[in-house]
Amino acid sequence: MSPSVQNLSGLDRVIHEPARLMLVALLSAVESADFLYLLKESDLTKGNLSVHLSKLEEAGYVEVEKTFRGKMPHTEYCLTPKGRTAFDQYRKSLSSVLDGKGK
Amino acid sequence: MQTNVQLDSVVKRARGYWFMDGFTEIAAGIFFILLAGTLLLQGNVFQASNPEHVLSVVGIISLVKLFGFLVIVLALWWLKDHFTYPRTGFVRGNRLTTAQVLMLLRNVILFLLLPIFGLLVVSALLATIGGVLSSLPVWFPIGVGTIWAVLCILAGGWTGVARFRVLGILFLLAGIAVGIWQWTVGLSVLPVDIQPALNQPAVQEVINRSLNSLGLLVLISGLPLVLSGFVTFLRYRKANPAPYMEES
């Protein structure tokens, strides 16, 4: 087995799941976003989205901030530095695996 | 690599979220039209012989521009808050890191040096300051149109918003068209001894024509911005007719 293929087993499993990967990618491009934005962009159900966000929060990749916009409660999600590093690392690992396979 | 390409498109989509409702383009277009109005007015006001009158009108125009800009920014903020965020959610843009700010600053400086370089090239070709100044109504709109086009096309690449590239090409074409039009009208013949005063008719004519050609370029550029923004807004409203409601 080539080293590049062996890298596959080293991929971050928290991020590797497609729905969570999409959420991390969305959050990587912004400072923070609310639940509705993530719901609309990811096309997940509310329950699914909550579960995936909880898992990312448990892993320390996502931080939740509860504020008020006017009188309405407002929840924003943002990637933590750990989450950003993990996402960058994931992309690099994936690229190296796919590049290695192509050679 | 396919996965990374898809990730890139997700990231670009998030970057371009600010423009998905069309409000920014409509606001920018309205500001452009307002600016065109003031530029065209300024171009004509400069024909007045009384310098005090000119200065007072220019002052009022500057106030109108500042006030108009503030009103448009506030309106944009209000529209986002009451129309877009309840439909498709709220996003806070990424803060720039120090390294990114420095890189941006370097690019802006390089970018600002481009017109100076262009001016030097034109000077070398035309040999005299008078020649450079008399051809100002031709190369000024072409230069401004080119700068806007580059900025717009770069923004299109950064955000993945394809219509920005089309708008960029339109800005470039508009700049070239206004420049060609001024060329066909003919260049002014300036006196050898140019004085920095308003009462030299040939210099005054060059200033008027430059302001008018810039005003025309801004007007031509503002109209497609409003149109593009309006079409984008209609599409957005069709896709998101009502604010998001919790399912019971």
Image (spheres, rainbow, N blue to C red):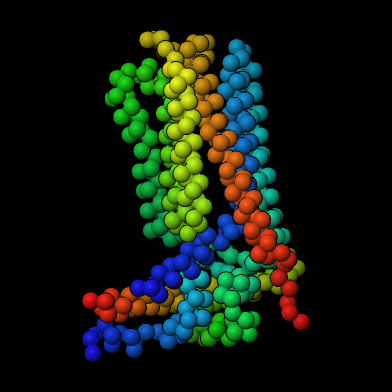
Residue B80 placement (x, y as % from top left):
66, 58
State the residue at coordinates (37%, 84%): A11
Residue B190 placement (x, y as % from top left):
42, 12
Instruction: Classify residue B6 as left or right of residue A53.
Output: left
Residue A85 appears in the picture as rendered: no
Taking depth in this image into account, of B60 and A17 the one nearest to the observer is A17
Q: Is residue A30 above or below residue B36?
A: below
Q: Is residue B63 above or below residue A75?
A: above
Residue A94 appears in the picture as rendered: yes
State the residue at coordinates (66%, 40%): B68
Placement of the N terminus of chain B among the 4 image quadrants: bottom left
Placement of the C terminus of chain B among the 4 image quadrants: bottom right
- What count of labels does the image hold? 0
State the residue at coordinates (55%, 31%): B216
Residue B147 placement (x, y as % from top left):
43, 40
Q: Is residue B48 above or below residue B138?
A: above
Specify the quadrant of the image occupied by residue B126.
Answer: top left
Q: Is residue A75 above or below residue A55?
A: above
State the residue at coordinates (38%, 58%): B99
Instruction: Classify residue B193 as left or right of residue B171.
Output: left
